[in-house]
Each structure stands twice: as C-alpha cells, then as structure tokens.
Amino acid sequence: MNDLLEVRNLVKFFPIMGGIMKRKIGEVKAVNKISFNIKQGETVGLVGESGCGKSTVARLILRLIEPTAGEIFFQKQNILSLSSSEVRKMRRKMQMVFQDPYSTLEPRFTIYESLREPFIIQKENNINLRKEVYRLLKMVGLKPEHSDYYPYELSGGQKQRVAIARAFALNPELVILDEPTSSLDVSVQAQILNLLREMQSKLNLTYLFISHDLSIIKYFCNRIMVMYLGKLVEIASSDELFNNYFHPYTKALIFSIFVPDPDEKLEIVPLQGDVPSPINLPSGCVFHTRCEFADEICEKIEPKLKEINKGHPVACHHPLENK
Amino acid sequence: MSLLNVNGLELRFHSLDGPVEPLDEVTFNLKKGEVLGLVGETGCGKTITALTTIGLISYSGGEVIKGKVFFEDKSLLEKTERDMQKIRGAKISLISQNPMTSLDPVYRVGYQIVEAIRVHNKISSKEARSLTIKLMRLTGIPLPEKVFYQYPHELSGGMKQRIIIAIALSCKPSLIIADEPTTALDVTIQAQIIHLFTELTKKIQSSFLLITHDLGIVAQMCDSVAIMYAGTIVEKGPVHQIFHFPKHPYTQGLLSCVPRINMKQKILRTIPGIVPHPRSFPSGCRFHPRCEYVTKRCLSEKPQPVKMNDGTLVSCFKYYKK
Amino acid sequence: MDNFKKTALKNTNKEYRPVPRSQRKIMWMKFRRNKMAVIGLGIIFVLIFTGIFADFLAPYSYREQHLELKNQPSSLKYFFGTDEFGRCIFSRIIYGARISLKVGVISTGISVIIGIIIGSLSAYYGGILDNILVILMDVMWAFPTILLSLTIIAIIGASLNSVIIAIALSYWVQYARLIRGQILSLKNELYIEATKSLGANDLTILFKHLLPNAISPVIVSATLGMGSAIVLEATLSFLGMGAQPPTPSWGSMMSNGRVYLLISPWLVIFPGLATMITVLGFNLFGDGLRDIMDIKMKE
C-alpha cells in the first residue's frame, strides 16, 4: 500500500502582535514538529483536546494556511511547492468536512446552489448540474426536494449531510473530517458515522478523522494518533492503543471516558490541572507539568517518538508498563 | 420525600407562524438527596422544562398552560416574581451550559461569589469573603486567595465552571439544576468537573437535577433517569434499570447507537428518521414514525405511563396489559 | 407490510417544512410594522416621482422670468410665490427635486463603490496594504468634510458635477470602514473556508460570498448617507460653490433668497422645508432598515 499522505516535521507558529508598534511579542506554537504517514485506504484518527493543534494540522494539509516549516507530500508530490493553479487542481483530490454544520453552508444559497459550487469552481462545464446535485443528495440520504431548501430550514444532521455531499462531489481521494459529529445529537451522530463508512467503501476513500472523543475514534478508525500541545505523543492501531497504551496522556484520555453503564463508574480523577498555554510551552516534555511520573529528565529533555512495539511509536521517557 | 414534583406540565410559545406547544404532560419527581438525570436530544424540551421550574420561562416567551410544579410541597407556579427571586440562588440554583457567558466579565470572580452570598444573606463582606475562599477550596480551585482577584477572562474554562459551581453552592441550596454543565469543556476537564459533582453530592445535602444528552455522565452520576423525546417523558426509573433493561424503543435505540470503548462494534444501530418539528408532532405516540414495533394503536392514541415491576414507568403500548 | 406500518413509514418520510418565506418577505413584513419607516419610504417615493415627472408636474418652467411679478407671496397662480426674478418657486422646487435626487444617488453611489473597493481589499488581503489603507481612512475621516469638499471644488471649479465629485470623495470613508469591519469578521466564517477548500479563487470568494453577506449595513448607511449628501449639496450651493444659475438647486435657492429673508421669507422657507422633509424621509427609512437588519443579525 502506498503512502497517500506524508507529513515531515510540520511546524506552525502563529505570531502574536502587540504593543504600540505592533511588533511580534510571542508565538502560539500550534503545531510543533509533527511527522506521520497515511496509507491509501486507511482511516486514521487524530485525537486530542482543544488547543492541541489538530484542526490546525488539517488546515495545513489542505494548505488553507501556510506552514512555518516542514514538508507535506501528497501522492509523492510536495504540495508546498505548487503554484496556485496547481493547488486548485489538488483541491479536487483532498477535501474536508468541517466541524460546525450550522456555519459550513453559505446561508444565502439554496442547497442546490451550494452543491453545484464544487463543479463550477473546478470548471466542470460539460455536465448536467441538476442531475449531479440530485445524485449527490441521494448519495447522502436526502431527497431532490431538499435542493430548494435554505440551510436554516434543515436540521443539524441534514446540514452535515449536505456538507458531506459537497466534499465528496468531485470524488476526492483523501477526506479530512474535522469533528464532523461534535455538535450533533447521539442518534444523528450514529447515522452520519454509518454514512461515512458506507461512502468510504463505495468511493474508495482515505479518511483522516479528527476528534476529541476517543470512543468515536476507537469505533471508526483503524489507527490512532494522540496529540497534545502541538506534538504527537503516541501512535498505534485502535486495538493496540486501548489494550496496550504507553503514554500517560493516552491513559488519562482513556480513563476520562464515561461509559454509559452505571456499573462501570470512574473512581479516580485521571488528570489534574489545566492544559498549559501554547504560548508558554513547558520545557522538555510538554506533558510533564501534569504527569504523575515526571522527573528531572522529563523537565529538561524533549522525548522523541520511538517505536516500542512494531508500528507503535511513543514520545515518553518513562512509558507505562503494567496495565 | 419529594423535593421537586413536576406534574402534567404543558407550555405554549407564540411566534410569527402561530402558537406552538412543545410539551405533553411532563411529569417527574425528584426525591431529597437524589440525583435525577433528565436525558434527551436537542429540542426534546428538557431545558424549557428546567426553566419553567424556576419560573424563568416567561423570559423566553413561554407560558404555562397546564400542570403544576411543587417544590418542598409548595406550588411554585403561583408565586410572585419577588418570592421566586428569594428562592432562586438560595433554595434552587441553576448551573447553565456555558461558563463563558455566565460570569460578568467586568467583575473579579471572587466578588461575584461574594455578591451571590450577600444577595440572600445579611452578613458582613469580611465573612462573605472567607466563606467564598472556603467555597473555592471546596470546588478544587488552587490558590483561592489569588484567584479571588482574577477576572473571568484570565481563567480557563474548567476554572470558570468551578467558580459557577461555587456560586451555585454558596447559599446551600436544596436543589441544584445543572443544564449540560460540561458540554463546553475538554474531555479531561469534564472528568474533573463530574468527579467534583459526585464528591459534592456526597458532602453537601443538595439534590441534583442534571440535564444532559450525554449518557456516560448520566451513568456516572445519576440515581434515577427520565428519558425525554419530543416533549414527552417516555421512560423513567432507577439508573440500573434504565441502562441494563431499557424498555421504551427510543431508550433502546439511544443506548445502542452510542460507540462504547468496551465493546467491539461493527456497525452502530441507528434510529431511522429525525426528531419531529414541534409544529408537526406525529399523531398518537410521538415516536411512532421511527419505531420498529409500531402498531395501529400507536398512530391514534397517546400511551400513558405504565408502572413496571422493577420500578420504571414506560409510556409505550408494548407494555400495556392485555 | 401491514397497513399501519406503511402509514408509520409515510409519517417518517413526511417532513415538516416551515412556510418557505424568503428572507426578503420576512424583512418586508417586519418593516411594515414600523410606521415611521413606512412614512420615510413614502417621502422617498414622492421625491422620486417628483423628480421623474417634473416636466408634467411643474405648472411653469423653472427659468421663465417675469420680473414684474418678483417676490410675490403664495397665490392661486403661484402656489409658493415667486422669487427675485419672478420665477415660480413651486416649479423650481419640483425641478429641484431632480437635482437633489441626482446629487444624492450619484454621489452616494460613487462613494459606496470607492468605499467597497478600498474596504474589501484592505480587509481581505490585510498586511501592509491594510495598514496603509487604514491610515488613509483615518486621515480622510479626520478632515472636516466641508473644508475637504470646498478644496476639491476650488481645484476643479464650481458646478453641480463638481459638487457630486466633491461629495463622493468626502463621504467614502464610512462605507470603507463598514465593509472592512464586516469582511474582517466574515472572512473567518466556516463557509468561506469551505469554499476556499473547494478551490475557489480570491475574486470568487470576495464577490460571490463575502460582499453579498457584508452589504447590509452598507445599504443602511448609504440610505442615511443620501440625506447627508443632499444637505452637503445644499450647503455647497448655498456657499455659491455648487449649482450655477439658473439651475434650481434648493441650496442655491436658499442662498439667493437670503437677502430677502425679512421681506419675502417664502424664498427661503420653501426650499428649506423641501430639504428638511427629504432628509427626514431618508433618515426615517434608513432607521427602519437598520432596525430590521438588527433583528436579522440577532437571529
């Protein structure tokens, strides 16, 4: 299987301007040297809490924002060196479904106008737009009548279906899903996840699924990357991560999940304190301020991602032993 | 010992397109010392029910057209606004969803807790201050003497929520209503806050009405659960019965469509269709268009609550005795 | 399948759609409730009607002089009386409506276009361009409007057209600032990002998505701005910098009639009233528009 996407040492620092002369007084270190690969056909999950940089990673891959440093290869091509017209062609192959269904559609367009946009923008002139839009609506479980609706007339789940139809219109190869179900109800979430599963096998897609919800990621993804304050701390297959985690933060995330079963109550608080600010990153290991196993080494030296088991790298000086 | 009793509640809202009546005889009971979870998805009516119990529904344009609310055996709906103000904050506290907007940005957080105390208690500001520090410590705020002087924007989401909880606890209320108290928080912070709630329910004597759509939190915190769908309570009972022996088809559907980390799930069983619009509730049982057990009766009649052997009440014709 | 299962399924498929009212219809329904705004709109209609059909409405020509009938008060023949050259004031007021309309619409139109161009480029591209343009806007904003317009007229010469240009160049800043503010906040909206990710270029995003959503406050401001433009024209013409005789601009009518204020006040009163009512009409309408826009924004 080929590498569809390859990310090397990706960095994104956002400058903070301040003072009278509007000079740079600090940086938000959103993405701090991240490297990973995604193979064709995989469903990879990127999990982390707010502010860890996962949404920024998505935007960097799509080149919606420019990286501060690092390389991104899509289908072996360096996308950071593409001209703007080549970027536009690349956009056909890489699409994103955004988090908030309530603001992802142009409020002044009917659903028909929103769904024909990809074809117009990519200059697909020799097709019957109406027919294509109806095909897309059917694909996501909506009806042709819905093409005359305005976004405010649809429910959250229906809006998200339209957003999915829009992203899949031109048969992309890689689809980045940025918290696609976070603002949806549980029953709607299940429907959308099933739809995404169905689409993946029909259209032969590769997914990068971003979420803060580890239960969804475990269900949906076959490989998981855990992110904390701009760094990847652990990468493993779904089963391996849950049965055999090594990083204390992974353990904290797993033990923060409330299972819908009153017999499985959480007795201990997994993690104390708040997430540090990405402006003032802790020295050494970014997690050491909240880690119960941290020592001097953790304070001083930043741990690199090292494979502990095959295909299971961890960035920790003292990976956990007994589970 | 019923602390809060809501009986047959129905509301009416007015709008450009005419009046709408979202609730259908909402009835539930909260005992002293109990944690009741009011569970449902968006638009099921749980928030407006909670607002009605503390008399705030008129501010959202709603009026009560049927039903009663009893708190400590006294009817609340007949009370004047002045009497309700004495109850709010003192006997019944509300913790609302978004800690970002619940705190006044121009006042220091310590002062806001002090203010909450002194509205209902005639004590000196010095006493109120020391009580505030105690409360902040109780809610797990580190270095409360320093945080006292901070402004809301200087605090993280989790800290702000702890301040809100401190305000809610300040007058030792008998009932705390928490409306989606952790939705806006990160996963690990949510765990801290829910853990704090569970500890508090053991330490203080308050009862909780927890409104949420998160079944995991309900399983963690609640003693009993009421499941709401499209303005009706379809099932209610002790938390073990609801989670292990769900009876109403909606409850069963809800529990089977949540991804669980302790189970291998190939596919999530979903409930077909979508939640109905309040202006066009289905006839008869409001859930019938999405129900796999639908019968002729479900289309025309509304099921009444049936008491089951294990203490749950289900509103479904499946459980009517022949 | 059982009959009731079929009915049940039909119920699932039957979806409720709230009465599909377009946004415009909703706005009109709300606007109708505001009586003052409707009056304002009525005044504007009267102004437009008068301007278009001036030739049919005016009983006399605006330049026909009858020196023997000069400075006469209102009569059945001359409803508003005659001016210092014996011209019918009523007819001149009617033709004056055309002037005011012309000035108001054209100058505001040019201002809005300049403002939109500068404001949207500044907001969309940001960076140094934004810094420079914002400084330009601040400087122009600080300049007293009358001084600025007088300076422009002094350079290009006094006439009605130069008044239009001067007003246009004096009033563009508020529209630029409005558009800039709107676009700054809108450009981070998710649907803009989504459109970008589909491959849209900057021009498409600006014209198809950003501007249509940003335009509402500008429309309100432009409506109110037309009133200001008309007043500025009256002022400039009053100072002799605008319409040259015999053009019946209300401002020049007031200017020329000023000398006779104590003996034949109607030379000044009627053009003054006309100006006042026109500006009032625009203000009431603009306020009404702002109220419904606010509600739309709150929703």
Image (spheres, coloured by chain):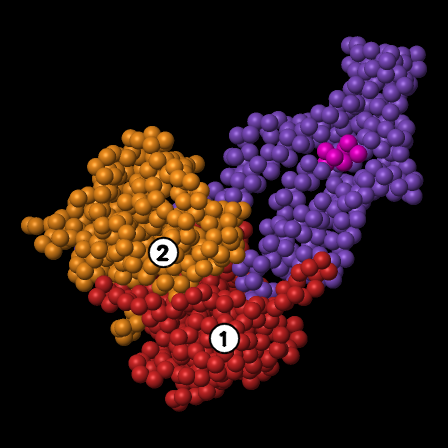
Same chain under badges 1 and 2? The reply is: no
Looking at the image, residue B286 lies above or below residue C270: below
- In the rendered structure, the colour chosen for chain C is purple
Q: Say which element carries label 1.
A: loop
* Closer to the camera in the image, B19 or A266: A266
* Closer to the camera in the image, C88 or A217: A217
What subunit carries mark 2? B
Chief SS of the magenta region: helix
- In the rendered structure, the colour chosen for chain A is red
- In the rendered structure, the colour chosen for chain B is orange
Among the 4 quarters of the image, the one containing residue C9: bottom left
Looking at the image, residue B190 lies above or below residue C260: below
The residue most toward the bottom is A310
State the quadrant of the N terminus of chain A.
bottom left
Q: Which residues are magenta?
A: C226-232
Q: Nearer the viewer, mark 1 or mark 2?
A: 2
Q: Amino acid at mark 2?
A: Leu
At horizontal 36% and vertical 75% (from top left) the residue drawn is A251
Is residue B102 found inside the magenta-colored segment of the image? no
Badge 1 is on which residue?
A286
- Labels 1 & 2 near each other (Cβ < 8 A): no
Give left or right: position of A70 versus A96.
Answer: right
Looking at the image, residue B89 lies above or below residue A239: above
Q: What is the number of the mark on residue B124?
A: none
Q: What is the number of the mark on residue B138?
A: 2
Q: Amino acid at mark 1?
A: Val
State the quadrant of the C terminus of chain A.
bottom left
